[in-house]
Amino acid sequence: MINNIQRIGNFTSSEIGALLTKDRSGKGFGAPAFTYIGEKNMERRLGRSLTEEIAARPLIWGKLLEGRTFDLLGLEYYLTSKDTIVHPEINFWSGSPDGGKYNPKTVVDIKCPITLKSFCQLVDAGRAGGIEQIREDHKDGEKYYWQLVSNAILTGSDVAELIVYMPYESEMPDIRMMAQNVPGEDLSKHYFIAMAGQDDLPFLLDGGFYQNVNVFSFKVPKTDKDALTDAVRRAGKMLINSDGSLISKEPVIKDANALKI
């Protein structure tokens, strides 16, 4: 993932929500947007990703459980997380959706929290008010929402699903076995799962209040698709080529008072 050429220096669905932050006037980019654009330009100069996220335990845990989640969902779902999609008209916009659903055409993102608290916060909010309540209550709710909007645009989907998975206690032996059988050099990164003790990893008690698989589906508003597309186009005017020159020659004025609202 670190050296995926379609993601390096490009706006990607996983962090694209930063481009929707506003300044005090509500018209210009906020500080998180400028930070994100700056990081993408650093990657363009470096020719590689800034992040070493591939070694992060939450990511390893989530990636390991993606396939298991799809096995539990049923045949109407398909897995696509190894594929990166580039926008057909905006070549500096890409994403790697976790999967999809055939009918109606739906883009899917799976979250497998590595803490029980985060799982409960996501599921409790989703049960209370769907994706809008998740956006309101969870610290990463906005990030998850715009990730799905971005991937809906890239895949031509009008429906999106946020799927939250936490294994039952009875599933843990199988998960440890999965970690032990990871091929090649990735095996060492999964050691913390393969050799975990009974209470070292999160799980749900069988027969308890929470279900292991939780699906929150929503129709993606066209207004939000348009707003994100406009933000990406405007942000693209601040991206540089590999030689340091701007992709666009149009001047861009940065608001010194920009902040997230």
Image: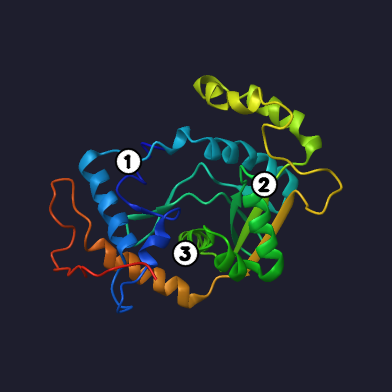
Residue labelled with disc 2: 116
Q: Could you give the CA–CA distance between mark 3 and mark 2, rounded to whole angstroms? A: 31 Å
Foreground residue, 15 or 243? 15
Give the image location of residue 51, x and y in percent: 37, 40
Residue labelled with disc 3: 153
Q: Could you give the CA–CA distance between mark 1 and mark 2, rounded to whole angstroms? A: 29 Å
Look at 13% across and 46% down and name the residue there: 243
Foreground residue, 226 or 63? 63
Residue closest to the far right: 207
Left-right relation of 252 to 121: left
Quadrant occupied by the C terminus: bottom left
Colour mapping? rainbow
Question: Are the residues at dot 3 and dot 2 in contact (C-beta closer than 8 Å)?
Answer: no
Residue labelled with disc 1: 50
Quadrant of residue 237 within the rendered picture: bottom left
Quadrant occupied by the N terminus: top left
Foreground residue, 160 or 55? 55
